[in-house]
Each structure stands twice: as C-alpha cells, then as structure tokens.
Image: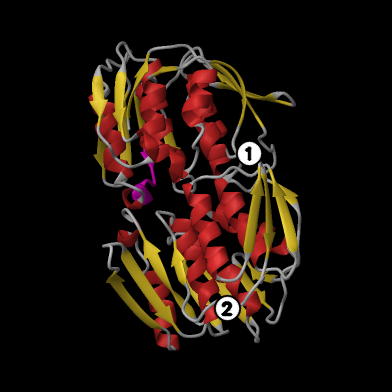
Amino acid sequence: MTMTFYPSQLAGTTAAPASKSEAHRRMICAGLTKGETTLTGFMDSADMQATSRCLKALGATLNQEDDSLTITGFAHRPARLPVLDCGESGSTLRFFVPIALALAGGGVFRMHGRLGQRPMDVYRDLFVPRGVRWRMGVGCDGAAELTVEGKLESGHYVLPGNVSSQFVSGLLFALPLLKEDSTLTVQPPVESAGYIRMTIEAITQSGITMDEIAPFSWRIPGEQAYQAKADHLNGDYSQAAVLCCAGALGHQVTVTHLAPVTTQGDRAVLTHLAALGARVEEKASGVTVTAEKLTGTTLDMADCPDIAPILALVCQLAEGESRLTGCSRLRLKECDRLAATIEVLNQLGGSARADGDDIVVQGVAKLRGGVTIPNYNDHRMVMLASVAATVAQEPVTVEGVEAINKSWPDYVNVFKQLGGKAE
C-alpha cells in the first residue's frame, strides 16, 4: 500500500502501545506454565502473531479479547518436530530454538522476508557439537526453513557479549526446564544488556530461580516449573521514541503509559534527545519532549539500535554534525536499516553517510521532501518517513506502508488523531 504524508502539526496526548519486547517474554513465560495467565494492555501485531503461533505449536492455547490475552500453557503435548512459523520476527526465532529443543526434541522453523538471512551460527556452534542435527533449507512455498533435531543438554554455555541478546534470552528461557543444573556466561563487553535483564525479570517473576555468580554469569538449577503470573504490559519506548522525536522537531505530543523505571533499553531515547538539546519532561500525565535548538552530538546506539533511524532524523535537523555509533546490527533487520536510513535522509534533502558501522549526519536547516520512499518492508522506515514529512517543505509518499503491521498496526490512525495528514 502506498500513502502520502503531508507537512502538518502534531499535537495531543496518546498512549504508547504495549512493549513488543516485554510482550514476547511474558507470553513465552505464560506458555511455559501449566496454568492460565492473563496479560492486559496487549496489542496484537505481526510479531505477536508469530510468537502466538509458536506457543500453539508447542502445546499452549491462546484467547484474546480486546486488549486482554489469556494463555494456557501445556494444554496439549507438542508433536514431534513441530512446525513453528516465525514470520519475520527475529526475537521469536531465536527465543524458540532452545525452547523447542528442550520441550519437543527440536522443530521446523519457518522464516519469511529477510529472517532467513539473519545470523543463527551462534546456536549452530553451541548445539551441533552437543549432538543436535541442524539443517537450513527451503520449504515448498520458497520460505526459508531451519530444522533442528535433538535434545537440549544441560551444561556450561558461554556466549560472546557482542552477539544479539536474543540468543542469551533463548537459553535463559530453556535451561531451567532441563533435568540437571546449567551455567550460562556472557563474556564482556555485553551489548543490549537491558534486554537480557528484561528476560531475567520476566522469568524470575514467573517463579524461576537463578544465581548470578558473576556479572552476566548465572547458575541455573534444573527441573524448575514456570508459574502463572498475570500482568499488565507496559508501554513500548521503541514506539514512543517516534513521537518523542516528533516533539523534539517542534510538535506538541505527550506520550502516556511509559514506566519511569524499566529494563527497556530504548528508554535511552530520552537521554539521547536531551544530549541533542531537547527538554524532556516526565510527569504523571506522561512524557513530553520539546526543543528550541538542537545541536549535533555523538550517540551510542549499541544497546538501542531500533531507535537509531528516528534519532538520525532528529540529528538531521540539529545544527552541526552528529554521529550515531554502534549501528552494526541495523544491517541485519527487516532491511539493511543502516543503508536505508542514510538513503531516506538523503532523499529527503538531508546529508548523511556511513562511516563503517556509524551513521554520520550533517545537520540541515530544512528537509525538502517531495519524494517517494521505496518499499523497504520495514516498519521503522515507514515511521521515519512519516515524521519527516510533517516537517518537510513538500509531501512524502511512502510505499509499503503495511510494514507497520509488524509492530504498531494502529500507527497511521494515531498519527492522524494527533493531527497528521496522510492519504
């Protein structure tokens, strides 16, 4: 679907959608219990549907009514080598590989879009020497398929700190289910530490115990059982970042439903905007960002890569040069998000370039707009282009707007409710 976004003024108050990262984790913990768990504040999306399908394949049942999701774990025994359709969700894929090995002796993981190109060698190198059979192939419909077969063994696992935290989280979910004790160590320096802490928070609140014997090194007892833990899902800072950045660009938006204390790494958007010269106000009524003048600076994206594109837009309209460092993982998203961010900014009339894994932006006074942004099949690119259009001199047409269904299906409606113009 193609949509044109127009220069316009955003104003008003809106709630951030439920945290996708938190929802993945709470859903999995609920699916691993033997009881019934209700999660409120839930927002459906393509990624949430991927995790739902995988939970069902492993024996859970799910029922959604409005923003309430009820999950009954272990409702039936999973089939041998169940088929787990992960859609385009990297989190879903990496979380469920060790879980499926622990519960069902493996599975067939279906991957769509660019997901089959995203690195999985961390698990392959861990599991194959332990007797797991690993085969990457293609299904009859052309979708990539990964087949893993064997049993997850307890033992000592070591991961380098520069790999995706999703690999760490997958093991943290699965190791407590094994008969024997295990240890898991992540070697420093550890990237995306906040996401690891988020997983630990979810599983410990679901009754799992683990001993941190050193920083990012745990002894995990075996033969544990997850316990049902009803919860209300917090708002998502990665989605709220879009509206907070809009505030820094001159819009008047307040975002509610954001926890001031959180393990979400993307809360860093508030710190990064303050570093650029924006004023950040956190009140009971919500988070509001304003700015009179923005000045370029260096921002570290290693622990919060998902908010790099929208922050790059803010940097594009800041005075002087900005550098977003630690952006290597952007190359492995729904598109090469590092290259796409630079391409979009330059199309809009900005000045951006890559320097290794950094994005370097030279600030401009105005964005020209008046262009068509191609279909990157990436929700972050859609949101970047839509906000850019509001402050550009001419409208911006975006192809593939349906990509937002991956994380925030209601985004365009929220955009319009705040005064944004799109058709």
Q: Is residue 324 magenta?
A: yes
Dots 2, 1 in contact, CB < 8 A: no
Classify mark 2: residues with Cα within 10 Å, few (<14), some (14-19) or many (20+). many
Q: Position of residue 228 (x, y in %)?
A: 75, 63
Span colored in magenta: 323-330
Q: What SS does tag 2 mark?
A: helix
According to the picture, the residue beneath numbered tag 2 turns out to be 103
Q: What SS does tag 1 mark?
A: loop
| Residue 197 in sight from this viewpoint | no
Q: Position of residue 40 (x, y in %)?
A: 70, 45
The quarter of the displayed image where residue 25 is located: bottom right
According to the picture, the residue beneath numbered tag 1 turns out to be 235
Which residue reaches farthest bottom?
131
Between marks 2 and 1, how big is the CA–CA gap? 31 Å
Mark 2: which amino acid? Leu
Q: Is residue 162 left or right of residue 202?
A: left
Which one is nearer the viewer's eye here, 315 or 307?
A: 307
Which residue is depicted at the point 43% across and 78% down? 126
Vertical comparison of 292 with 114: above or below: above
